[in-house]
Image (cartoon, rainbow, N blue to C red):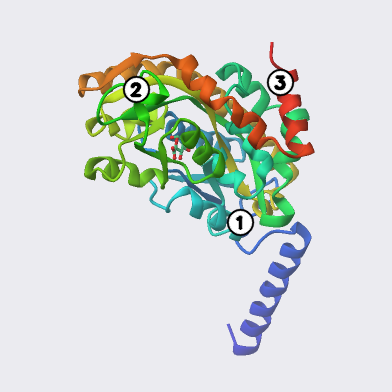
Amino acid sequence: MRKTSRLAFVMTTALAAVTLAACSGGTAGGADAGSDGGDVAPTTMKLALNQTQTHPSFIALEAFGERLTEATDGRWNIEVFPDSQLGDQAEYLQSVGDGVIDLAIVSAPQLENLNDDFVIFSLPTVFDSIEHQMSVLSDPAVVGDVYASLEDSNSITVVGGLTQGARSVYTKDGIAQTPEDLAGGKIRVQESPVFIGMINALGASPTPMAYSEVYTALQSGVIDGAENNEISYSTQKHYEVAPFYSYTRHLIGADFLISNTDTLASMSEEDRAAFDEAWTATWEQHTELWMADTEKAIADATAGGATFEEVDSDSFLDALTPLLKEFITTDSQQTLFDAIKATAE
Ligand code: GCU
């Protein structure tokens, strides 16, 4: 090719690329591949997770990626980074907002720090059961507004929820039959006002820290205990250093899939519909896995030396009920709370 014609070729190609990008409204990463695919590079979304590869969330999210790839003929893929490889949840908020990461799973208390309406999802007695929780978290009439509430302020869209099951307290030094048994003990909490309030209400001393730091903190005695569901307790191997799991079942926790808002907006209508459909199959699979894996988690932890015991859970609930008054302080919180309660059986 002679010099002038090569230049003309380069310019024509560049112009074509600009025109294509302008027509599709795609992002720098070529995110909008159009529905026929083929000529635009596929987009791989990074998904940050703080769980191990044996946790139901990892298993379901890997399957989410496979479903999406298949439904979009490979235009969109998901790569899941487990084990806090991309940092801790508090950092995911920033990275997803900035578009450095496209997707992440974060616990409700993290979102509470951006919009205090999210506090409702972490209050005791809000959900009657995992089934009730999942019907709420997937119902746009109840959660549509709060899921979209961070788009303008933080460029974060909440796509949907996953259950964390019931959370209970576990400790290094013995079963806690009532809150009195925790008096003065240092209990790790997620980094949010409602979780701090919860441990204070039980008469213990809350120590906020990231999930990935809990094992070492228990081992070294920086904390005396923590609270979580059986699956996290088992997959994180916390039973090795805090073998007493007391069934306080003080609340049913919620995780959320968050996405960078621009990434979602750059999808074609067809691909976005495929994404939503793949997500529905994913949370449904996750809920099923949750039930089965809870039994396995109890068996694994028991084999590793853990003791699980039913305790006076009413005494914990009585101590925590005042939190409802303390943390529902705005009209929008009350509206969300009432809408959730109205869906209960
Ligand atoms: C659960 C939840 C996580 C959360 C963790 C925690 O495992 O699924 O999203 O980070 O609890 O206590 O920090």
**Looking at the image, which is closer to me, 222 or 61?**
222
Which x, y percent locates residue 314? 49, 15
Task: Give the residue type at disc 2.
Answer: Ala
Rounded to the nearest whole Å, what is the CA distance between mark 2 and mark 1?
A: 40 Å
Q: Which mark is residue 341?
A: 3
- Above or below: residue 298 compared with residue 240: above
Q: Nearer the viewer, mark 2 or mark 1?
A: 2
Task: Give the residue type at disc 3.
Answer: Lys
**Which quarter of the image is occupied by the N terminus?**
bottom right
- Answer yes or no: is residue 61 visible: no
Q: Which of pointers 2 and 3 lies earlier in the amino acid sequence?
A: 2
Q: Secondary structure at mark 1?
A: helix
Q: Nearer the viewer, mark 2 or mark 3?
A: 2
Task: Give the residue type at disc 1.
Answer: Gly
- Above or below: residue 73 compared with residue 152: above
Q: Quadrant of residue 131?
A: top right
**Looking at the image, which is closer to me, 122 or 272?**
122
- Above or below: residue 38 compared with residue 194: below
Q: Residue tagged by mark 1? A: 97
Q: Quadrant of residue 245?
A: top left
Q: Is residue 57 left or right of residue 334?
A: left
Q: Secondary structure at mark 2?
A: loop
Q: Which of pointers 3 and 1 lies earlier in the amino acid sequence?
A: 1
**Which quarter of the image is occupied by the C terminus?**
top right
Q: Residue tagged by mark 2? A: 176
Which residue corresponds to the image point at 64% horizontal and 35% vertical from the top-left? 326
Which residue corresponds to the image point at 26% horizontal and 31% vertical from the top-left? 172
